Structure formats: structure tokens, C-alpha cells
Image: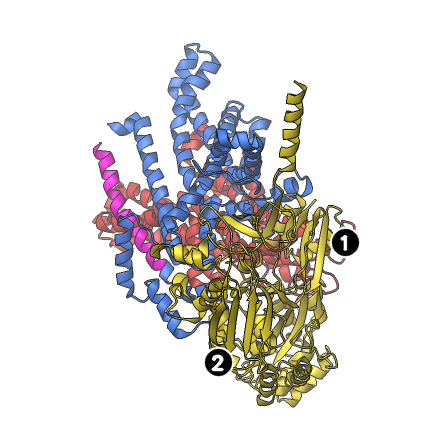
Chain colours: A blue, B yellow, C red
């Protein structure tokens, strides 16, 4: 428990640092956010100043930061200059989309990656092993912004099998309940009104983006599973188990897998960060209305509060998952506890 | 039993008949507001003014002709300074989840809508930033001296001086009529709802908006005008032009606005689609800052005019979907001077002129390339690369520079550029909307005169043309002005691009608007 | 040192993957260096009569342009060849910058420990808690788009990896006998850190540097794709890809080819890095 409380205490300076970085880096971006709001036909100086004042951009920068910090602590991340919505509500509106995409990608990466890795470890140095390891290295090296385009080109444009972009067909107006379309489309009132068509539409829209986003995690998981299985299989107690005459299946699935699982789970947890990175590019390509696309769009639009808030929340999530990994690791690994 | 089956059958039949006709429109961006008074960009105008609101007078769909809107008729006094509008009776505002009107449209709404922009003491003047770019840009504030309610169905507007462009301005998006009753009902802390949850008299009523994703509308059942058969109108916000095309092909939307020129040829061949095209009301040009050396030298400007190969740009950048421009206004606008002879593409002549100007070996300069895609210039960066190659041939070494859009605007309005790509989309079809805004002396100060060229003779001609309403007299002034603009060459006119709209075969009733808005009232889905 | 390299190469030769990687890297380097000689056209020359020509082996192609032309009528093969110059130098620059800064900070942190270590590690943790691409995008947005700024941004993002690896290694080494011996002979901190300890941290550094190449190339291409990297008329693969996006349907080869180039070069560095790791990691070596 001491370990955990120390970890949590460490969090404070980290978060302070993140808010400092997010605040000051973004202030340095060239281009005037007020002028951007005013548009291409110009403005008179009086209105310009009024607008600057109403956005709080006329105060000294230190004071702006102080106000920013106080607001964060009150849970107020500011208001988008472009849409006038609160940053928090904009984030909350988009976050489920990213989580849904990320979870589906990760789920399938695990579902496919772990068995492949185990199989490759068992059939070590076989053709299958080589084939799998080379394809996973290709997957790992994949520029996903290109991979996404190729998937669209082939499956959507050439074959017409999958939708081009977006989250669901626009004709369906799904009331937001959880924000996850795969769940919201299965609510009774949606099914009575539209049947299963919205669910199928949501599912179809998920296919390509989750392949694109899941490619790298899949490769990483398969490789990690293989190498940690190999390591475990080589340990002394495995030999003992074999000598004791345990069946091969039992050895692999009961003993080896359980011990190999620790590093695998750690790897998976660490993949959350790379999924968010991947989401920035994947969402841009597939017009997926999640936080990645949101951040990129606000950078082009110089929407300071949104960039600040977005960077802050995303880093917060990553920091928290890292701590979660530590905790999981702590409980899974008995050595750590002593 | 038979009866029961019959009833059941009938009800199924009826329910299919009543099944909503959806129309999904692939739009190019998120609107900045749903109040047409606050916006100038085509995206926001189409999402608000064109389909949710009406104006006293309107442009006839598909033309720039002015026809009755919420005013069924109007009278103009002899001195051309007093306009009396007779309002259309029995026009209903939208009934939505957030507002139920208790009365029909009347003169109060007209006064409310104009005064919000004109009077600083109006309760809504400062709401949503209170910036009325068009109203101020068109100098409507100083032009209109008085608005009077003569009776609930009659409004009188008095002008400071006669103005030939007044009626055309009245038909523009920013003169849309808002509901006073709605405004009165909004509590003080919810005033911005007026601009985010619109109530108008137009063919479609607003339902919901999800930024960067979609906008939903439904049919306005009590709409006063003619309407097609669309029950639910959905804007699918799709900023990528080629993605709009792909979605249209996949049947995810029935209409794609401004598809990429590169895809047009292919779409025309597709039997499931139809493509409509129109000579757009626009101009793309390269402006030369005459207040900077060496562009103060007429010979240099003429040399550059001879050195740029417009044909190449039209092939590579516009995919041949544009016509080369020799005047600032497109040929579809009246007073176009067709007798002007354009500078031909001639390297030797250009070199000679440059030599005469004292630059036998050329010089080095910067060119700012347009950072956003516009119909008048679909790819500024690529066009810059081509211009760079062309100017290199006469010894002018060009460095390409670009900024993000707001910085680009900021710096160019301050006149920091030498060579700069720009363009213009017409707002109301009047020649003054081009000449005055882009080359008038007053615009040097306001910044939209990008060559910063102020020619007294030219400026007198276009000012005189504004004071009379006689089209013949005005035409004469503008014809002369075009000759001066050509001879002095402050800008190289590049192209008037065509605009494209692509839609599914079963969509009828769409009319292309030369001003670039999409009016969807008459759409019939078959 | 010589023996170390010899041994390393001997181990590497056993690994087919890394040999393939090395061969591809050598070929790419040759292509990049010889670009002016082997490129059939000037990559910036515009052939206005040949816009968006398909590759020569496809119907409608022209033998003059092997891989076809782009939207301005520039030879695609020549642009890809010159693109290798950009990508390889970008990768090299990123590795160099992040390696130098990262090693310096890592050695100091690991050697001195205490407050210095805490501060450095706190900053690296901060940078690592931001997704790399997001952080790079923000940096480029501040400094303005362009290849130099993209390199700087990607290098900053890559620094923490080096710091962490070196720090851990230095911490393990600093209590060894030879360090104590050097201290007894009166060696200064600087000498101990960079002359005595650092050479013993080479193995993980080499692996990380190789992998840093592929990360650097990939991240710079991603920035180019988002329009924040190399600017016209420079031919950079990521930028070419984003320019070609609008022609994905009408001219798919413009999208396909630059991506294949990025993939191949990134893959070859990863192959090499993998091989190096296997060769240098004594624990894995035992198993083989």
C-alpha cells in the first residue's frame, strides 16, 4: 500500500508539469486566435479588442495560467473559442467514439495475437513461425496513415464492401445513451423503430478503422506472446514438469501461459498510449468523430482552450493507465510485493 | 376477419406511404453559426440562410434576379431613397422542440432583424460576439437612416443616398428575417440560443447539430412557398472533397457539394450519378503589391502578366474546369468587357519588358500561396509551384511562402506581401461587389485590395457607377474601368472556375446557384 | 572494440532478417547518394502535357515515365528516388540529435542520481506521457511547418527513450570495480562518465539508435502526411502521400508507391534493429 500511495503522490508534480506544458507550448503558436474568429473580411480595432477581452487573452500570461489552473481544479477546462461549448462537454461527446474504436481494435488484436504468438512459440523455427514473425514485423513497421488509405482504396472504393468513413449511416439518428454505438443501437426503442439496421451499420463502419488501428497492437502482442512463452518454456520448472510426465497441452496452457501472461498484460496495458497516438492518424483518415480528429482540427483552427484541455486530458489518461499498469504488475508479480 | 386483414393491409400501405423521405447532403464543413447575420462563409450560409430562413426579397434560385420573398411587393420613391415593402401575409415561423410561435411573421420581425445589426442598443446586438461582417462591410449601417413600421404588414426603409446595389444587398444572406417573438422569449442568459438553435420561416426547421458530424432538419409543414418532398434533411459534414465523392458513390449521401475537380470526369461516366456544372461567379488571381519595389513598375507587372501560362494552370490545377480570365469579373456578370485583349503567354515579350524595366537578369521575390482550397483556386501550393517554374524562365526567382489561413489574412491585409494568390466569390452578382471590394481605393485601407493599387481614374469610375441605378449608364462606367485595370495590370487574372454539384440520379429539382449556395427547398427524391 | 564489431557481425550473419535489412539499407543509401545520376528526370520538372500518367507497364502509361507522373506532371520515379535522400537524412538527423542529447542527459542522471536524476526523469516522464505524434504536432504547430522543424519535433520526442536506456545502464555500471579503480586514480567525473562508463553501454545504445531511425522516418512521414513536414517542391514521401490523397480513386498509384517506400525503409531498419538486439542480448544468446 505504501508503494501505491507513493505512486499516487508522484502524480501531483507530473500533472502540474503537464498543465504547464500544455498551457505554455500552446501560447507560442503563431497566428492570432481572435483574428481567426473574425474571418476573412476583416474587423475594426474596437471590436477586435472587445473580443480579445471577452476571451481573457488581454491579461498577462502568468495571470492567464493561474486562472487556468484554478479552473482545472474546479473541473472547468475552458470553452472552445470556435463552438462556444465547454471543452469538457466536447471531449465527453467524442471520447466514447475513440474508446469504442480503441477497444474493438485492442480486443481483436488480443483475440488473434495471443493464440498466434503461442502457436509460433510451440512451432518454433517452423515455416509458420518465420512467416508470422516476418508479417508481424511488417505490421509493426506499417505507416498506418498509408495503410488506412490502402484499406479504403481496396475494400471501399474498389470492392464497395465497407463504408468509406464515419461512424454510422447518417440517416440513423441514434439517441446517445452510453455513447458507444454498438450498445446504443441495441436499445429496445431503437430496435422497435429501425430494427437491427443501425447496429449493422455501426458494425460495418468499425471494420476498416479498427483493422488500421489494430495492426500495430496485433503485431506487438503476437511478438510479445511468442517471446515470453519461449522464455517460460525454457525455465527449469518447465523441464521439471515435462520430466514429471505432464501432458504437453497442460504444460503449455496451464503452466507456461499463466507465467507468460504477466509481461503480456503489461504490454497490452502499455499499448493504450500507442492506441491514442494511432487514433490521431486513424481518425483523421476515416473521419471518425473521436478525440484524435478533434485535437488535429483544433490545432488547425487555433482553438487554444480545446488544444490545452485535450492535451491535458489525454496525458492524464495515459498517466493514469501507466499507474494502473504498475498496480496490475504489482498484484500479478509476487516478487514485487516482498 | 376479412375486414381486419383489410385494415391491417391498409395501415401497412399507409405507413409505407408515410415513410419519411430522407435526403442526405454531404456538406464541406461545420457551420460557424446558424444565424446568417453572423456568417460569411458558404458552408454556414447554406446551413442557415438558404434553407432555414427567408429574406424580404430573394434571388430567384439559379439566377441573380431579384424576386419577392417575405415581401410580396415593394415601392421605390422617386428620389430612390425610400423603399416601402408590403409583407407577405400568413407566413408561419418554425415550430420546434424549443419554440412554439403564437403569431405569424409581421413587420416587427423585420425591424428586429435589421436593428439587431444596425443599432448598438438593440438587446441582441452584442450577443454571440456581435460582429456583423457583411452588414458593416456593405456599409448598410450608414446607408439605412430609418426603418419604420407603417402597419403590421408594411415596412418603410429610408436611405442616406440612392444606392444601386441596395435591393441586391437585401436579398443577401445577412438580411434574413429572424423571429422577434423567439428573441423576446429567450431568458437573458440564453440569448445565444437565437444563433445556435435557429427559428426561421424557410423550408426546413432545425432539429439538432453535432459539430464535425451532422446537422438534422425536418420539413417545415407550414412553409409559405413551394417545396419538394423531402421530410428529413441531413447534412453529413465531410470536409474532404474526395471523401464526399466516395460517399456519394457508396450511396451514403445523395448529394455532394463541390466535388474535387479530379473526380468530375469519372463521376460524369457513372450511370448512378448526375453532375451539374455552372460557370461560377468567381475569380482567382495573382496580386502584385504596387507599393513594393519592383512591382511599382508597370513594365514589371506586364512582364509577369506575359510570363504566366494560364493554360497549364487550368489543366493541372482546375482539371480544365475553368476558363482563363482576362477581366476581374466573370463573363456571366453584366458589364463584362469582352473587347479587352488579354496578355498572351509570351516568354520573349516578358523578357524584353523586364529588360526595359531595368531587370535584364530578373530578380528575387516571394510569392504567398493560398493555404486553403477554394473553387477559384483548388490548390494554391501546387499553383505556386507552377508559377515558380514559369517565372524562373524569365529570371525571376520566386520563394514560395505560406501561412496558416488566419495569419495569411492578417499579414496580407497589412500589406506585407509582394506577390500573393487570392480570389473572390461573388456575393450578389453586382459588378461593384468585385471592383469596389478588390480594387477600390477605400479597400486599400480595409485590406481587401491586395495589390494595394489606388488609381484615381479607376476609382472615380466605379464610385460614379454606384450612385446611379441606370444599368446602361453603370455598364458604361464599368466597361471603361476594366480597360484601365487591364492596362495598369495590378493583378494577373488567372481563371473563373466552374462549380460542380454531384447527386444521385433519383434527385430532381435542384437548381445550381451562381452565388454558390445550395437551396434544397425544391428537392424531390424519387 | 574491433573484436566487438567482428563478433557482432558474426552473430548478425546468422540472422537472415537483419541481413535483408542491411542490404536494403545499403541499396537505399546508394540510391540516395546517386540520385542525381540514376533519376531519369528532374524531380521538380513539370511536364504539363503528361498529367497523372499511370505507370509505364499499365495501359495508358508512357515508357518515358516508369512509375507514371503526379498531378503536376512530375516523374514519380524520380521523386521517389529523391525522396529517399530526404527520408534517410531525416532519420539520420533525428537519431543524431536525440542520441547526443539523450545520452548526455541519461549519463548525467544515472551517474549523479539524486536531485539531478529526479529532475531529468520527471521531464522525460512528462514527455512520454504525451502521445509522441500529438506532442510533435504541437511542436510543429508552434514553430511552423517545415522539414527542419519536423526533425526537431521528432527528435525531442525520441530523446526520452535514450535517456531511460542509458540511465539504467549507467546505474548498473557505476558501482563496478573498474569505476572505483578509475576514481582511485583521481579521474574526474567527466572522464569517468564518458570515457570509462559510456563505452560499456554501447550495446543497448546501438539497438535503440537503429530503432530510432525507423521511428524518426515514420514520425516525420506522418507529420508530412498531416501537412506539417516537408514543403514543396521538396519530394518527401509523407508529403507526396498527402498530396495524392485527393487522387486516390483516379490515380491510385500516386498513393500506393510512396507508402510502399516508407514501409520498406522502416521495415529494413526494424529488421536490423531486431537482429542487433538478438545478437547483443546475452540472455537470448544463451537460449540459441
| Residue A289 in the image, given as x and y percentages of width and height | 49, 45
Q: Which residues are magenta?
A: A1-25
Output the chain of dot 1.
C
Q: Nearer the viewer, residue C134 or B112?
A: B112
Left or right for B3, reference A263 = right
| Residue B297 in the image, given as x and y percentages of width and height | 59, 87
**Looking at the rendered structure, which numbered label has been put on residue C61?**
1
Q: Does the magenta-highlighted stretch encompass residue B342?
A: no
Residue C161 visible at all: no
Q: Which residue was labeled with disc 2?
A: B445
Output the chain of dot 2.
B
Above or below, B179 against A88 in this view is: below
Q: Residue furthest top?
A: A245
Q: Secondary structure at mark 2?
A: helix
Q: Does the magenta-highlighted stretch encompass residue A11?
A: yes
- Structural crowding at the residue carrying mark 2, measured as other residues with C-alpha within 10 Å and reported as few (<14), some (14–19) or many (≥20): few
Left or right for B12, reference C150 = right
Instruction: Measure the C-alpha gap from mark 1 to mark 2.
Output: 52 Å
Amino acid at each position: 500500500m505504501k508503494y501505491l500511495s507513493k505512486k499516487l503522490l508522484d502524480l501531483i508534480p507530473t500533472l502540474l508539469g503537464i498543465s504547464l506544458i500544455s498551457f505554455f507550448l500552446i501560447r507560442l503558436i503563431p497566428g492570432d486566435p481572435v483574428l481567426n474568429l473574425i474571418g476573412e473580411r476583416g474587423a475594426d480595432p474596437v471590436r477586435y479588442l472587445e473580443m480579445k477581452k471577452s476571451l481573457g487573452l488581454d491579461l498577462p500570461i502568468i495571470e492567464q495560467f493561474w486562472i487556468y489552473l484554478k479552473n482545472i481544479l474546479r473541473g472547468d477546462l475552458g470553452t472552445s473559442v470556435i463552438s462556444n461549448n465547454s471543452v469538457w462537454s466536447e471531449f465527453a461527446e467524442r471520447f466514447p467514439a475513440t474508446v469504442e474504436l480503441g477497444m474493438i481494435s485492442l480486443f481483436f488484436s488480443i483475440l488473434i495475437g495471443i493464440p498466434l504468438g503461442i502457436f509460433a512459440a510451440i512451432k518454433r523455427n517452423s515455416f509458420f513461425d518465420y512467416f508470422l514473425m516476418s508479417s508481424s514485423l511488417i505490421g509493426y513497421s506499417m505507416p498506418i496513415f498509408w495503410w488506412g488509405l490502402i484499406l479504403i482504396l481496396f475494400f471501399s472504393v474498389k470492392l464497395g464492401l465497407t463504408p468509406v468513413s464515419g461512424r454510422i449511416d447518417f440517416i440513423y439518428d441514434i439517441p446517445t445513451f452510453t455513447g458507444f454505438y454498438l450498445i446504443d443501437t441495441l436499445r429496445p426503442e431503437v430496435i422497435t423503430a429501425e430494427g437491427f439496421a443501425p447496429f449493422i451499420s455501426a458494425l460495418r463502419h468499425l471494420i476498416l478503422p479498427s483493422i488500421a488501428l489494430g495492426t500495430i497492437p496485433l503485431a506487438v502482442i503476437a511478438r510479445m506472446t511468442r517471446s515470453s512463452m519461449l522464455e517460460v518454456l525454457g525455465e527449469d520448472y518447465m523441464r521439471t514438469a515435462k520430466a514429471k510426465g505432464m501432458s504437453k497441452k497442460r504444460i503449455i496452457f496451464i503452466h507456461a501461459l499463466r507465467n507468460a501472461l504477466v509481461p503480456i498484460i503489461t504490454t497490452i496495458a502499455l499499448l493504450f498510449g500507442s492506441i491514442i497516438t494511432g487514433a490521431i492518424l486513424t481518425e483523421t483518415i476515416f473521419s471518425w468523430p473521436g478525440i484524435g480528429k478533434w485535437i488535429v482540427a483544433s490545432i488547425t483552427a487555433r482553438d487554444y482552450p480545446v488544444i490545452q484541455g485535450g492535451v491535458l486530458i489525454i496525458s492524464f489518461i495515459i498517466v493514469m493507465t501507466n499507474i494502473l499498469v504498475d498496480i496490475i504488475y504489482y498484484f500479478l508479480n509476487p516478487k514485487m510485493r516482498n | 376477419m376479412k375486414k381486419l386483414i383489410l385494415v391491417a393491409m391498409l395501415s401497412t400501405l399507409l405507413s409505407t406511404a408515410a415513410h419519411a423521405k430522407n435526403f442526405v447532403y454531404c456538406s464541406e464543413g461545420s457551420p460557424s453559426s446558424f444565424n446568417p447575420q453572423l456568417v460569411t462563409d458558404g458552408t454556414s450560409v447554406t446551413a442557415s440562410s438558404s434553407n432555414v430562413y427567408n429574406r424580404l426579397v430573394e434571388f430567384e434560385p439559379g439566377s441573380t434576379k431579384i424576386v419577392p420573398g417575405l415581401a410580396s411587393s415593394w415601392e421605390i420613391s422617386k428620389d430612390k431613397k425610400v423603399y416601402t415593402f408590403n409583407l407577405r401575409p400568413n407566413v408561419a415561423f418554425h415550430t420546434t422542440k424549443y419554440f412554439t410561435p403564437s403569431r405569424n411573421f409581421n413587420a416587427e420581425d423585420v425591424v428586429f432583424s435589421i436593428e439587431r445589426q444596425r443599432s448598438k442598443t438593440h438587446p441582441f446586438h452584442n450577443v454571440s460576439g456581435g460582429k456583423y461582417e457583411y452588414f458593416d462591410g456593405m456599409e448598410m449601417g450608414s446607408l439605412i437612416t430609418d426603418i419604420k413600421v407603417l402597419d403590421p404588414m408594411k415596412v418603410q426603409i429610408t436611405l442616406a443616398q440612392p444606392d444601386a446595389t441596395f435591393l441586391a444587398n437585401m436579398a443577401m444572406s445577412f438580411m434574413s428575417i429572424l423571429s422577434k417573438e423567439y428573441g423576446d422569449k429567450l431568458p437573458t442568459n440564453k440569448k445565444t440560443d437565437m444563433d445556435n438553435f435557429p427559428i426561421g420561416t424557410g423550408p426546413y426547421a432545425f432539429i439538432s447539430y453535432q459539430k464535425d458530424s451532422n446537422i438534422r432538419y425536418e420539413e417545415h409543414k407550414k412553409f409559405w412557398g413551394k417545396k419538394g418532398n423531402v421530410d428529413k434533411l441531413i447534412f453529413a459534414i465531410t470536409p474532404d472533397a474526395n471523401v464526399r465523392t466516395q460517399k456519394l458513390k457508396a450511396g451514403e449521401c445523395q448529394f455532394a457539394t463541390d466535388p474535387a475537380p479530379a473526380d468530375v470526369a469519372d463521376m460524369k461516366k457513372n450511370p448512378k450519378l448526375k453532375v451539374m456544372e455552372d460557370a461560377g461567379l468567381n475569380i482567382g488571381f495573382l496580386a502584385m503589391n504596387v507599393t513594393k519595389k519592383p512591382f511599382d513598375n508597370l513594365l514589371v507587372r506586364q512582364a509577369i502578366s506575359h510570363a504566366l501560362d494560364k493554360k497549364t494552370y487550368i489543366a493541372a490545377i482546375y482539371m480544365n474546369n475553368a476558363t482563363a480570365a482576362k477581366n476581374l469579373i466573370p463573363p456571366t456578370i453584366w458589364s463584362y468587357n469582352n473587347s479587352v485583349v488579354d496578355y498572351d503567354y509570351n516568354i520573349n515579350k516578358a523578357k524584353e519588358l523586364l529588360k526595359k524595366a531595368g531587370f535584364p537578369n530578373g530578380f528575387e521575390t516571394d510569392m504567398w500561396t493560398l493555404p486553403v482550397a477554394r473553387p477559384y483556386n483548388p490548390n494554391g501550393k501546387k499553383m505556386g509551384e507552377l508559377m515558380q517554374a514559369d517565372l524562373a524562365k524569365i529570371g525571376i526567382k520566386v520563394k514560395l511562402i505560406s501561412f496558416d489561413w488566419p495569419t495569411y489574412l492578417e499579414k496580407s491585409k497589412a500589406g506585407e506581401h509582394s506577390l500573393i494568390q487570392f480570389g473572390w466569390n461573388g456575393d450578389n452578382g453586382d459588378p461593384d461587389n468585385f471592383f469596389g471590394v478588390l480594387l477600390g481605393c477605400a479597400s486599400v485601407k480595409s485590406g481587401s485590395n491586395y495589390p494595394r493599387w489606388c488609381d484615381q481614374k479607376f476609382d472615380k469610375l466605379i464610385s460614379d457607377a454606384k450612385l446611379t441605378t441606370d444599368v446602361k449608364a453603370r455598364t458604361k462606367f464599368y466597361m471603361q474601368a476594366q480597360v484601365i485595370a487591364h492596362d495598369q495590370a495590378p493583378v494577373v487574372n488567372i481563371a473563373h472556375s466552374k462549380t460542380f454539384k454531384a447527386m444521385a440520379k433519383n434527385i430532381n429539382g435542384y437548381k445550381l446557384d451562381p452565388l454558390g449556395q445550395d437551396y434544397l427547398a425544391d428537392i424531390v427524391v424519387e | 572494440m574491433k573484436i566487438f564489431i567482428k563478433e557482432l557481425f558474426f552473430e548478425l550473419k546468422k540472422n537472415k532478417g537483419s541481413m535483408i535489412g542491411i542490404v536494403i539499407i545499403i541499396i537505399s543509401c546508394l540510391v540516395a547518394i546517386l540520385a542525381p545520376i540514376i533519376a531519369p528526370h528532374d524531380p521538380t520538372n513539370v511536364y504539363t502535357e503528361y498529367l497523372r500518367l499511370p505507370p509505364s507497364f499499365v495501359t495508358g502509361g508512357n515508357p518515358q515515365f516508369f512509375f507514371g507522373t503526379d498531378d503536376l506532371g512530375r516523374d514519380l520515379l524520380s521523386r521517389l528516388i529523391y525522396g529517399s535522400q530526404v527520408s534517410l537524412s531525416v532519420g539520420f538527423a533525428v537519431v543524431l540529435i536525440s542520441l547526443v542529447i539523450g545520452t548526455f542527459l541519461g549519463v548525467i542522471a544515472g551517474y549523479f542520481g539524486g536531485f539531478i536524476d529526479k529532475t531529468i526523469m520527471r521531464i522525460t516522464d512528462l514527455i512520454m506521457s504525451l502521445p509522441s505524434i500529438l506532442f510533435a504536432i504541437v511542436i510543429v504547430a508552434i514553430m511552423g511547418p517545415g522539414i527542419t522543424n519536423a526533425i526537431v519535433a521528432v527528435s525531442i520526442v525520441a530523446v526520452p527513450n535514450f535517456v531511460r536506456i542509458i540511465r539504467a545502464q549507467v546505474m548498473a555500471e557505476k558501482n563496478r570495480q573498474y569505476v572505483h579503480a578509475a576514481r582511485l586514480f583521481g579521474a574526474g567525473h567527466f572522464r569517468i562518465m564518458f570515457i570509462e562508463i559510456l563505452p560499456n553501454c554501447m550495446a543497448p545504445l546501438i539497438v535503440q539508435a537503429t530503432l530510432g531511425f525507423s521511428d524518426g522516418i515514420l514520425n516525420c512521414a506522418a507529420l508530412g502526411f498531416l501537412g506539417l513536414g516537408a514543403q514543396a517542391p521538396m519530394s518527401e514521401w509523407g508529403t507526396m502521400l498527402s498530396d495524392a490523397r485527393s487522387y486516390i480513386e483516379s490515380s491510385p498509384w500516386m498513393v500506393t508507391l510512396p507508402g510502399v517506400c516508407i514501409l520498406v525503409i522502416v521495415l529494413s531498419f526494424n529488421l536490423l534493429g531486431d537482429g542487433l538486439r538478438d545478437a547483443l542480448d546475452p540472455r537470448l544468446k544463451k537460449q540459441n
